[in-house]
Image (cartoon, rainbow, N blue to C red):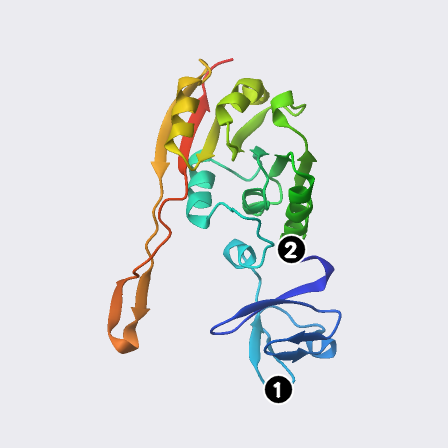
């Protein structure tokens, strides 16, 4: 993580601190001299004795610490996006509708050799996404403050994500920038958006799948003999429409 950020974890909490200065947290004070030279797996304490372990953070850890704009794509959907798009270690990925940068960061974090080109028309969102990319310590994302409906310069994308209110309009403009065989997913909260996309689908693209992910967490309080579904969960967030370019 850049700027000597250190990720700390204990049984109930996780925090990110700056290893180069004194950090006054709700759990106590972390002094820089107690952090110097510590590696993942090392135990550190606050001035009042609260213990944490230094860990190497992964995507689910980092997403908990990002700056969040009103809506982010959840891990349950990002997992499907990464797998069904066929993202691999040298993929060139198009991302439209950067938002907080969660999708761009999650996909770029799979491999340093992945290249993500992320587009967003709102400058304030780009600023947030760049800060989140710093948290992930990523240098393989190029953020662009630009309207993709005007066309883009980059070509030969392996896959793409459209988190936009009108993906059907964008597909007609950017399909030529993708390789044959490339997959694109549209993230649409409303089924009407999906219908409009399907009715306007370019002739050289075919539908592979349309899915909706619902996630139900379970209570696992074994010591109290509780093992059952939670009363709430992450149900409908959006429809994921996966399409594939099959010809020029």
Q: Front-most of 218 and 121?
A: 121
Under circle 1, the secondary element is loop
Q: Is residue 30 left or right of residue 52?
A: right
- Quarter of the image for residue 230 reads bottom left
- Answer with mark 2 or mark 1, whichever residue precedes in sequence: 1
Above-or-below relation of 144 to 129: above
- The answer for how far apart the CA atoms under marks 2 and 1 are is 27 Å
Picture disc at residue 48: 1
Crowding at label 1, few (<14), some or many (≥20) Cα neighbours within 10 Å? few
Q: Front-most of 166 and 37?
A: 166
**Label 2 belongs to which residue?**
135
Q: Position of residue 65 (x, y in %)?
A: 57, 59
- Whether residue 180 is visible, yes or no, is no
Residue visible at 56% across and 80% down in the picture: 51
Q: Is residue 6 left or right of residue 214?
A: right
Residue visible at 64% across and 43% down in the picture: 125
The quadrant of the rendering that contains the N terminus is: bottom right
Crowding at label 2, few (<14), some or many (≥20) Cα neighbours within 10 Å? many
Residue visible at 37% across and 27% down in the picture: 208
Q: Position of residue 236 (x, y in %)?
A: 36, 44
Above-or-below relation of 239 to 53: above
Under circle 2, the secondary element is helix
Above-or-below relation of 133 to 26: above
How many marks the image carries: the answer is 2
Q: Position of residue 83 (x, y in %)?
A: 43, 39
Q: Residue furthest bottom?
A: 48
């Amino acid at each position: 993580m850049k700027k000597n950020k250190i990720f700390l974890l204990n049984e109930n909490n996780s925090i990110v601190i700056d290893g180069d200065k004194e950090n006054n947290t709700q759990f106590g004070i972390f002094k820089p001299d107690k952090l110097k030279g510590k590696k993942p797996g090392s135990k550190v304490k606050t001035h009042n004795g609260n213990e944490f372990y230094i860990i190497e953070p992964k995507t689910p850890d980092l997403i908990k610490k990002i700056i969040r704009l009103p809506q982010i794509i959840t891990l349950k959907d990002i997992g499907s996006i990464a797998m069904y798009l066929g993202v691999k270690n040298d993929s060139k990925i198009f991302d439209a509708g950067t938002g907080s940068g969660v999708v761009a960061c999650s996909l770029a974090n799979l491999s340093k050799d992945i290249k993500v080109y992320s587009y967003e028309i709102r400058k304030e969102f780009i600023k947030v996404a760049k800060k989140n990319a710093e948290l992930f310590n990523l240098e393989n994302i190029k953020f662009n403050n630009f309207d993709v409906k005007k066309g883009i310069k980059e070509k030969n994308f392996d896959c793409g994500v459209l988190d936009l209110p009108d993906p059907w309009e964008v597909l007609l403009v950017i399909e030529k920038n993708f390789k044959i065989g490339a997959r694109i997913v549209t993230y649409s909260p409303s089924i009407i958006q999906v219908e409009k996309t399907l009715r306007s689908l370019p002739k050289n693209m075919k539908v592979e799948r349309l899915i909706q992910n619902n996630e139900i967490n379970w209570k696992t309080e074994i010591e109290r003999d509780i093992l059952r579904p939670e009363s709430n969960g992450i149900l409908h967030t959006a429809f994921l429409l996966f399409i594939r370019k099959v010809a020029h």
